Amino acid sequence: MEIKLNGQEYEAYPGESILDLCRREKVPLPTLCYHQAFGGQGVCRMCMVEVAEPGQKEARLVAACTYPLNTSVEINTESERIKRIRKTIIMLLARRANDHPLLEKLADDYGAPRLSEIIVQPPDCILCGLCVHACEEMGKSAIWSMFRGIDKRIATPYDEASEDCIGCAACARICPTQAISYSEKGSVRTIWNKDFALAACMRCGKYYATQEELLYLQEHGDYGQENLCESCRKKTLAINMKNFT
Amino acid sequence: MQIDLGEYEHTREYKNLIENYSSQPEYLLAMMQDVQKQYNYLPRLAISMIAEYMSMPVSRVYAVASFYKAFSLTPKGRYVFRVCDGTACHIKNSETLLDQLQQHLGIMAGETTPDGLFSVETVNCLGACALAPVMVVNGKVYAKVATGDVKKIIKEYGGQEHDS
Amino acid sequence: MTANLEQNDRQIVLVCCGTGCTANGAREVFQNFQTKLKDHPEIEVQPIIKATGCNGWCEKGPLVRMMPRDITYCSVAAKDVDEIVEKTLLNGVLIKRLLYRDPVSKQQLTTHHMTDFYRKQHKIALRNIGEIDPGEINDFIERGGYQALKKALQGMRPGELIDEIKASGLRGRGGGGFPTGRKWQACSEARGETKYIICNGDEGDPGAFMDRSILEGDPHTVIEGMILGAYAVGAAHGYIYVRDEYDLAVQYLGKALKDARKNGYLGNKILDSEFSFDIEIIRGGGAFVCGEETALIASIEGRIGEPRDKYVFPTEKGLWGKPTIINNVETWANIPVIIREGAEEFAAIGTEASKGTKVFSLVGKVVNTGLVEVPMGTTLREIIYEIGGGVLKKRAFKAVQTGGPSGGCIPAELLDLPVDFDSLTQAGSMMGSGGLIVMDDHTCMVEVARYYVNFLAEESCGKCTPCREGIRALLEILTNICRGQGRIEDLQLMEDICLTMQEASLCALGRTAPNPVLSTLRYFRDEYIEHIENQFCPAGVCRELTTFFIDPEKCTGCTLCIKYCSVDAITGEKKQVHVIDENTCIRCGECYRICTFDAIKLARREHYGN
């Protein structure tokens, strides 16, 4: 159906979110907790936009990532009110991810004042929850958002090494502020208080995954017996294909 | 991972409490409340067993345990001193009662004495506002508690004054 | 709308066994009556639950009420029972010392119905509380219970029920104030075979206990309401979500459900109709945020109580993704009456946009604390002064806090505001679940704001940024101000953060969290400034900013303060001027509040922050 966005007309698919529409039509909309693998969460509230529904006099504020388009609405993504909201959210989040380039850039863009920093666990975490989703998507759910209110934080049960963690570091890679750290010393990767033996690539010898991760993938039948790192796997595949043709 | 062998003694009891309910998600809270009531906290092994029974990740069950105030992840004391911090009690000085408890027992709200005898907590409004300020110890309600009464109440449960 | 309890001469003794009276020994009184009256089977003894704190009587408990003469005795001790049986029950003689003495008129009254507190109320939701044994379904039936259900199942179509609720103008009593009829209509029209009914009994506002009283004192009215709702929208399953701390309510509800099933009001083919419905009790986990619909649903689904955006309502996609109605306890309690008596009678009470009555819990520094049910539109002044008896100890009225942590503080100049959904919202507060906390001049409004923000800091689910981080920042700032470390620019910063919280938070908890801060800034800004610029707390509450001293001109040497001081900081002989030792004094303020000669004064504390 037809909707108006910032004065221009667009076609929207019924049920899609405002953010889906913006992404498709290349209308810029800042987000911090969105990832296309998981859809909108409505957590960071950076994507708040003004929406005037048919028949309503006043526009209301909604989260673009979770608001479903089902009627011909009018949307504004760049009003003064919206910019003010973004500025305040950045001001508040920058306390948690103090000095992080991502938040620094946003703070500059929106003129967010600087407040005193707060120490959070893990450091720089903005509680976007993407790591929890990633771990859930991997099928392990070793971490979750624990506690509530101002004490809420991402952790493993008891803050101890989790039986469910396979050390794949999907959480660390998806984190927008690189809050989840892991170290690799020789053939050992340590993440979330747990040590993992790393497997070496058969072809180039580089450590590329934990043994637990490979075992898990094999158990789920997705992964062959080849112990190859990503680039070697691609090269091997290319050679095989060349040989095939 | 730490294993408390003591908990394994209770495996059968945990199993009984858990399997009292079907494994549908709507019984998660009830199951955890039963364990909490029996043991005064949620033992680690019980949490793992619940997770397995419900086909939920341990982290999710732990998240639920850490989210809701009804649950304690560490053992509570034999006597739990609960000070109501509802608004009516608050404006009738419940904070001073809390201070007195903290001073005499040597622990802060949310903590338990090292000997495992006493815990102190603030509790949300109990709805007995005409009796403000209210204190409850193991279900016994103390009404209109004056600052000076706290020492006496602690003595009732065998507590001595803490040398702080 | 209240029926008489008994039409014949059968004597009944009602002993209140609510939380308050039990704390004062009511169980022993009840047992003594049972023992003593074993030889008098013509006199019945019943345990009842009074709406706790009727007339402040919670503190005058244990209460014993005798029918049909409707005599009430206060502060009854177990040893008084013999005398009561001999003199009053068997010989009709009143025992004067046990009668209630009205604090305003100073009259001794035989029955609470003669007090202003009762005469000015209009009870619908609370109609049965204190009049019936909540464990006895026949008491409920005798007073018109389950008649609405019979009327509906035997003569009304579901659509007609919905029309009746719409015509009544009933709006949600939990705080949201959403038109109940419209909610039911939406659920009825939603697609799907499976639908759910939920009763929200997660009463979280500190100072509010109307839901607890209804669940404890009249569980069947909620059950009947839910059965009617289920019939109206086509639901087969219902849940009553009760706050974890309400043990007694869970107990009485359990019994009531059993009895309802036994009598054919719940279960398969209710009252020989084709309609089947049953209810389960779910105990909350202890989370204020679970009073929010979608958080409550998450809780029942075995997840943490995080709300979700409500662009699609629960009436379309609720519990397990199915159409669901969630209504508050008090809302459900009104339903049977509306169906039984008709919508018109209900709509004749209240104001244009707020029909019917509302139960308020009047607590704090007020003479008569307790539950008060009045028509919507009654003014704050009427409730606090005419029904409530005014401020305790005749101190100055400072503010009344309404709507719990989602509400705000209303100052004296707005006492003539009518209490309804819209007037209070315009004044910067809200009606919420009906909490009315009266505050006197010994209350620090900055500290009240800090208290509520501190409450929300623990109760917020923590999911969304504006609420979690906004509350964190507000708490830091307010705590600093109360410690004398505030800065004047922080006031503007708080207002900016509050605005974003109102606009961008994911749920109503975050959107209304700023209310206590904004309302106190609006009406009591000078108190904030006093704390910041002069490091002084005019109410004598903020300990780092207060010191107490005794005015030698006013002190009469009565030793009352010495008796009350828990750290022995005051010295002095009888009839000699007393002195407070500043170093020992912990600034609890008890002496300040207890002195009847106004001899204890406040002063700015020179040294603080150690």
Image (spheres, coloured by chain):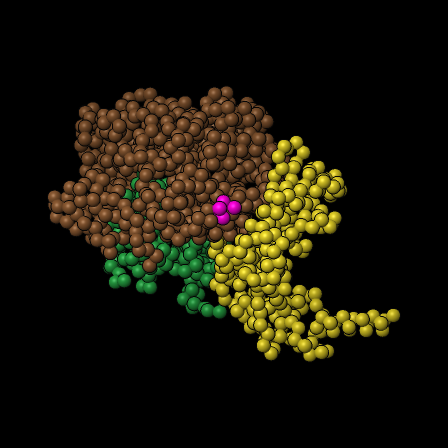
Chain colours: A yellow, B green, C brown
Q: Which residues are magenta?
A: C492-496
Q: Main secondary structure of the magenta part?
A: helix
- What residue sits 39% from the left and 60% below the top? B75
Query: Which one is in front, C225 or C204?
Result: C204
A128 or B30: nearer the eye? Answer: A128
Q: Is residue A236 above or below residue C185?
A: below
- In the shown orientation, is residue C582 left or right of residue B23? left
Q: Position of residue C64 (x, y in %)?
A: 27, 32
At 58% from the left and 50% from the top, the residue drawn is A87
Image location of residue C217, percent across then percent down: 38, 35
Q: Quadrant of the C terminus of chain B?
A: bottom left
Image point (57%, 31%), residue name: C182
**Residue C209 sits in quarter:** top left
Q: From this viewpoint, is residue C122 visible?
A: yes
Residue found farthest to the front = C533
Number of numbered labels in the structure image? 0
Tell me the residue at 35%/36% (across/down): C398
Q: Is residue B63 magenta?
A: no
Q: Quadrant of residue C139?
A: top left
Q: From the viewer's side, name the closer residue of A74 and B4.
A: A74
Where residue B21 appears, x then y in whole percent?
A: 49, 51
* Coordinates of residue A112 in the picture (x, y in percent): 57, 53
